[in-house]
Image (cartoon, rainbow, N blue to C red):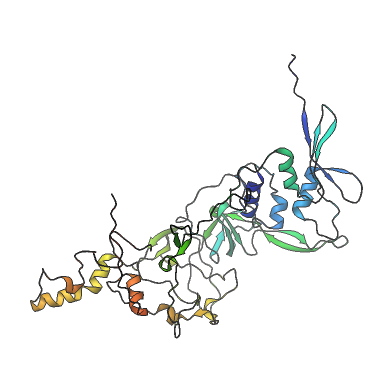
Amino acid sequence: GEYARPRALHIRFCAVEAGHGARWRPIREALAAEWLAPPTAGNARVDLVGVVLYDSGRGIELSSAEPGMGFLTAVTQGLVRGADRMSKWTSKRGPRTFYKSRGAKRTGIYASNGKFVQIKEMVPEFVVPDLTGFKLKPYVNYRAPAGVDTPLTAKALFLETAAPAIEKDFKEGTFDANNLEKYGFEPTQEGKLFQLYPKNFPR
Amino acid sequence: MRLSALLALASKATLPPHYRYGMSRPGSLSDKRKNPPWSRRRPVVIEPISDEDWHLFCGDMVEILEGKDAGKQGKVAQVIRQRNWVVLEGLNTHYRYVGRTKDHRGTMIPSEAPLLHHQVKLVDPMDRQAQLPLVKGKPTEIQWRFTEAGERVRVSTRSGRIIPKPEFPRADGIVPETWTDGPKDTSVEDALERTYVPRLKTLEEDVMEAMGIQETRRHKKVYWY
C-alpha cells in the first residue's frame, strides 16, 4: 500500500498554574522560577504539573501526567516508554520466587539430610582488646603537626628486629650461619597457623 | 537517559563542560541565577598554570600593575585558580547596591573586581619597625627554589629574599593555636607518642599473643596448580 507519511509528534512543554485554571506558561520562564526558588508549601503559585504530548496530526493530547508527579519523572515518562533498563537488578525486584543474595558469605554447610549446619569457625568474631587506659581518641588536636614516620619496609623491619642480635653475635664471634632460627628465621612455613607464603589469612 | 541516571546526576553536583567560573561560588543562588543548567556561553581563554608554578596565595601583599588602582598595594583576599584570578581587599572596586527592596534602593557598597595573575606582582618584604612608618615594598618577580632544609619557597629575583607563605585565617574560623581539646580529641603529646615496637610477628599472631588465645589446630594441606 501507500507509504504513510510520518506524522509530526510535537512535545509541547508547558506548565500549568495551579488554582487558576489551565493557563500555560513558557517552559523557560517556569523552569527559571522553579530553579531559583523551589515552591514552598504555603505560597506556591506555579505548580509544574507535567508534560503533555501533543500530536499535531490528530490534534489531540496523547498523554498527560497526574498531578503530584515530579517534573523530571513526567519528562522521562513522556519521552521514553518502558522499564528502567539501566538500574541495578537487585533482590528487591522481581517476583517473590526470585532469589538473589546481597553478597553475605555462608557461615556453615548444608548437611546430607538437607539441613544447614552452622560452623563456629566460619562465623566472624570480633576480637576486641580491653581499652581501659587507651589514650588515642577518634579526633586529633589541630595543633598536632604532620607525622614524619615513613611506611615500614622489610629492610627497616629487619634492621630493627634481627640485625642488632646478629651484629652482637658476630662481634663476639659466636655467629653461626647454619643456626639462623634464633634470630627469627623460618626455613619453612609448614606448621604455622598464619603462613606468609602462600598467604592463608585474608588481611 | 533514564530516571536512575538523572537521580544519580542530581546527587553529585557536576558542572557543565564549559562552565564559566565567576566571582560567585558554584552552587550558590547567585551562581544559579547567572549560570542556569542550560546556559552555554563561549568558553574563556585561560592560561594553564600548574599548581607548582602558581605563586599567589591568600594573605600575600601584592601591587597592582594596571587598571584603575595601578600602583597601589593590597592584601590578597581570594584566589580563584580556575580563572587565574586574584581578588584584593578594598582595591579595584566598583560600586553596587545591596539589600534592595521595593521602596528602598539599598545600601551602596564597594565590591572588588578580580585581577589576573599578570596584572599583580608580589611585593618584596621590607623590615618593619614599630617606630618608623610602614615602608612600602617594591614589586618583584618570583622564583620557586629549595632551601637547604629542602623546603620549597618563593625567592625574589631582585633581592634574593625569601617571601614566606602568609598566614590566612581558615574558612571554618578555627584557630589551631587556641584550640582546646574536646572529649573526643587526642592531645598533641598522645598523638605524637611512638608506642610501636616492631616485631617479627604478623598482626594476627601479635593479637593472639596479647589476648592469650591458644590455637593448636592447623589448616589441612591444600594443593592447587
The residue at the point 48 percent across, 77 percent down is: A143
Q: Is residue A68 left or right of residue B171?
A: right
> x, y (%) of residue A5?
75, 20
Name the residue nearer the viewer: B40 or B225. Answer: B225
Q: Is residue A201 left or right of residue A81?
A: left
* Furthest-bottom residue in this view: A133
Name the residue nearer the viewer: A190 or B105. Answer: A190
Number of marks: 0
Name the residue nearer the viewer: B103 or B129. Answer: B103
Q: Quadrant of residue A85?
A: top right
Q: Quadrant of residue B133?
A: bottom right
* Furthest-left residue in this view: A173
Q: Could one spot residue A122 in this view of the protein?
A: yes
The residue at the point 24 percent across, 74 percent down is: A161
> x, y (%) of residue A142?
51, 75
Q: Is residue B138 left or right of residue B98?
A: left
Q: Quadrant of residue B151?
A: bottom left
* Furthest-right residue in this view: A20
The residue at the point 43 percent across, 57 percent down is: A112
Q: Could one spot residue B130 in this view of the protein?
A: no
* Furthest-top residue in this view: A1
Q: Quadrant of the N terminus of chain B?
A: top right
> x, y (%) of residue A140?
49, 76
The residue at the point 19 percent across, 73 percent down is: A183
> x, y (%) of residue B128?
50, 75
